[in-house]
Amino acid sequence: MKKRSKNYLEVSKKLSSQKNYSIDEAINLAKETAFAKFDESVDLAFRLGVDPRHADQMIRGAIALPEGTGKEVRICVITSGDKIKLAEDAGADFVGGDDMVQKIQGGWLDFDRVFASPDMMGKLGRIGRVLGPRGLMPNPKLGTVTPDVAKAVKEQKAGKVEYRTDKNGIVHVLIGKKSFD
């Protein structure tokens, strides 16, 4: 038999696997039962009963949360011209054009999201093999390829989260931290 910690046993007494909790009850329980020394994340998981191997059943998108996620996001913007200054003013951490593409091609990946203007997508094709497997490749459907990069950066810094089905047809999404009201 598995040995359980004191904290785990204490928390398991408060929960029932037979009961369906309302959202308010679940949030209160998450706050009561949190015992980690750091600010824990609160995630939602939805089993939708879809088969993600079929393209028409793949669920993917992005939504802006009203209070953000509590995470600090490092944003890289690849654009050209006067949009570079606009992206810097909007709060982007790393901004550039061809120089940024060369830097990423060299192996630099010290960022969480990549935004690009449509005119730079031809050059981003060269680094698709680097960004693609990590889920960083800009995509027009998710709003990471946009002519208005400043607006996209502001939304991301405010707390926009992306969601997509995993290989089992479940959608996982971060909604906040235990310290949120």
Image: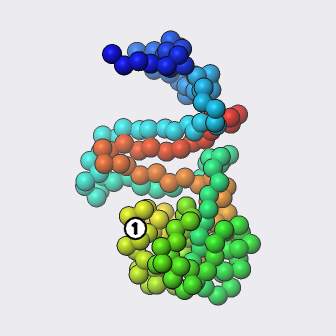
28 relative to 172 in the view: left or right: right
What kind of residue is marked 1?
A: Gly
Instruction: Name the quadrant containing residue 100.
Output: bottom right
| Residue ID for mark 1 | 132
Measuring 59% from the left and 36% from the top, which residue is drawn there?
A: 40
Q: Is residue 131 above or below residue 99?
A: above
Q: Circle 1: is it few (<14), some (14-19), or many (20+) Cα within 10 Å?
A: few
83 relative to 17 in the view: left or right: right
State the image coordinates of residue 39 (x, y, percent, origin top left).
64, 37
Q: Is residue 108 visible?
A: yes
Measuring 61% from the left and 80% from the top, which residue is drawn there?
A: 96
Q: What SS does tag 1 mark? A: helix
The answer to which of 81 and 98 lies nearer the viewer is 98
The answer to which of 142 and 2 lies nearer the viewer is 2
167 relative to 175 in the view: left or right: left
Q: Where the C terminus falls, by quadrant? A: top right
